[in-house]
Image (spheres, rainbow, N blue to C red):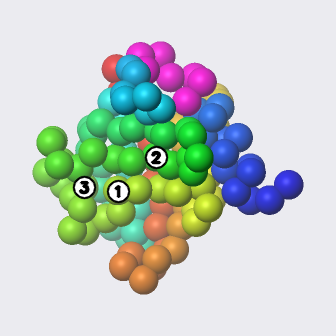
Amino acid sequence: MSQEQKNIIELSDFKSDLLAPQEYGHDGTKFTCKVKFSVGVNIETEILDAVIYTTYQPILKLNMFDNAKIITDDKYHSDFNTSFNKFKYDNSTKTLTINGNSSKLGNYKVEISEHI
């Protein structure tokens, strides 16, 4: 099984465990989440809305435009594609962890859990 296929399963498991999901468009699931972004020694946490799209190319998008004051698009990534990152869902803590590397940030880790 490819890493992308594993990522899709992890994202799907996370989505299935959401307690207060809302339909968003024809293929999206919107929810409020606690986001913890770690880049090197910098760690920032904020409550944001997010949308999971599961058709064609599964992706998780953070909405940084409405409420973001700390985790903003100019400093961090807002889209997490199953093709380019490593997703891992911890069922016991209900946390989705995304590890990635980019020219903008270097190595980074994002931990996302539903916030109700």
The residue beneath circle 1 is 78
Tell me, yes or no, whether the two marked residues, 2 and 1, touch with CB atoms within 8 Å.
no
Label 2, on which residue?
60
Between marks 1 and 3, how big is the CA–CA gap? 9 Å
Quadrant in the rendering for residue 82: bottom right
* Residue 17 forms part of the magenta stretch: yes
Left or right, 115 with reference to 58: left
Q: Sequence order check: which comes first, mark 1 or mark 3?
A: 3
Seen in the picture, residue 92 relative to 58 is either above or below; the reply is above
SS assignment at label 3: loop
Q: Say which label, 2 or 3, has the lower sequence index.
A: 2
Residue 13: x and y in percent read 65, 32
Q: CA distance from mark 2 to mark 3?
A: 15 Å
Residue visible at 74% across and 50% down? 6
Say whether residue 45 is left or right of residue 10.
left
Q: Position of residue 37 (x, y in %)?
A: 38, 56
Give how far across and how far down residue 87 sits, in percent. Answer: 61, 52
Examine the rendering and report whether any part of residue 36 can be seen. yes
Q: Is residue 95 left or right of residue 70?
A: right
Q: Residue at x 21, y 68 (%)?
A: 74
Residue 88 visible in the shown view: no
* Residue type at the position of mark 3: Ile
Q: Residues within 10 Å of mark 1 (few under 14, many from 20)?
A: some
Name of the residue lying farthest toward the bottom: 103
Task: Report whether 112 appears left or right of 64.
Answer: right
**Res 49 quadrant in image:** top left
Name above or below for residue 78 compared with residue 39. Answer: above
- Classed neighbour count for the residue bearing mark 3: other residues with Cα under 10 Å, few (<14), some (14–19), many (≥20): many
x, y percent for residue 10: 66, 41
User: What's the mark number on residue 71?
Assistant: 3
Taking depth in this image into account, of 89 and 65 the one nearest to the observer is 65
**What is the span of residues highlighted in magenta in the rendered image?**
15-21
